[in-house]
Image: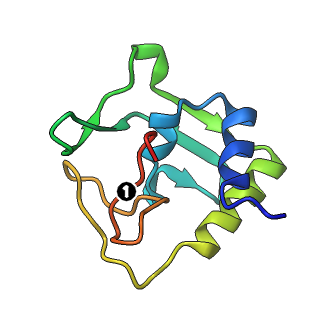
């Protein structure tokens, strides 16, 4: 049986990304040509249910991660499956989140 989040789990296990960093990824954070993932922020949802972008937990957390061939293919699948009929929600100036719920809101670790 196919798991809706197979690519997510694969990427998390093979890159060491934190879930909040992955949830904060936008299309702009993926350099598919050079196969680099740019990590400089994370997505959080606060107690009042508002979405908020934060910097990475430490300076060392801001990094560029090279994509292996497998990770590259996982991101390709995610981008191909990403619905185009949902609204693009902006959170603190960031837009184009990879994973969104049925209302177009970015998915967070809680999901």
Near mark 1 (Cα within 10 A), the count class, few <14, some 14-19 or many ≥20, is many
What residue sits 54% from the left and 30% below the top?
18
Q: Nearer the viewer, residue 15 or 10?
A: 10
- x and y percentages locating residue 59 in the rendered image: 40, 15
What residue sits 33% from the left and 71% below the top?
103
- x and y percentages locating residue 104 in the rendered image: 35, 69
Reply above or below: 103 against 75. Answer: below
What residue sits 52% from the left and 35% below the top?
19
User: Which residue appears farthest toward the front when viewing the image?
Assistant: 1
Residue 49's image quarter?
Answer: top left
Numbered-mark total:
1
Reply above or below: 63 against 44. Answer: above
Residue linked to disc 1: 106
Q: Nearer the viewer, residue 85 or 32?
A: 85
On the rendered image, what quadrant is the N terminus found in? Answer: bottom right
- x and y percentages locating residue 108 in the rendered image: 41, 45
What residue sits 62% from the left and 45% below the top?
36
- Left or right: 17 as drawn, with respect to 9: left
User: Which residue appears farthest toward the left when viewing the image?
Assistant: 48
Q: Nearer the viewer, residue 27 or 108?
A: 108
Reply above or below: 33 against 67. Answer: below
- x and y percentages locating residue 9 in the rendered image: 69, 43
């Amino acid at each position: 049986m196919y798991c809706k989040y197979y690519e997510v789990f694969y990427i998390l296990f093979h890159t060491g990304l934190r879930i909040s960093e992955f949830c904060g990824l936008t299309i702009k954070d993926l350099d598919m040509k050079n196969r680099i993932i740019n990590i400089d922020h994370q997505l959080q949802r606060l107690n009042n249910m508002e979405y908020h972008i934060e910097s990475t937990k430490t300076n060392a957390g801001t990094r560029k991660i090279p994509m292996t061939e497998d990770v590259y293919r996982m991101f390709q699948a995610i981008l191909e499956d990403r619905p185009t009929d949902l609204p693009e929600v902006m959170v603190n100036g960031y837009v184009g989140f990879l994973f969104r719920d049925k209302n177009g809101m970015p998915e967070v670790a809680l999901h």
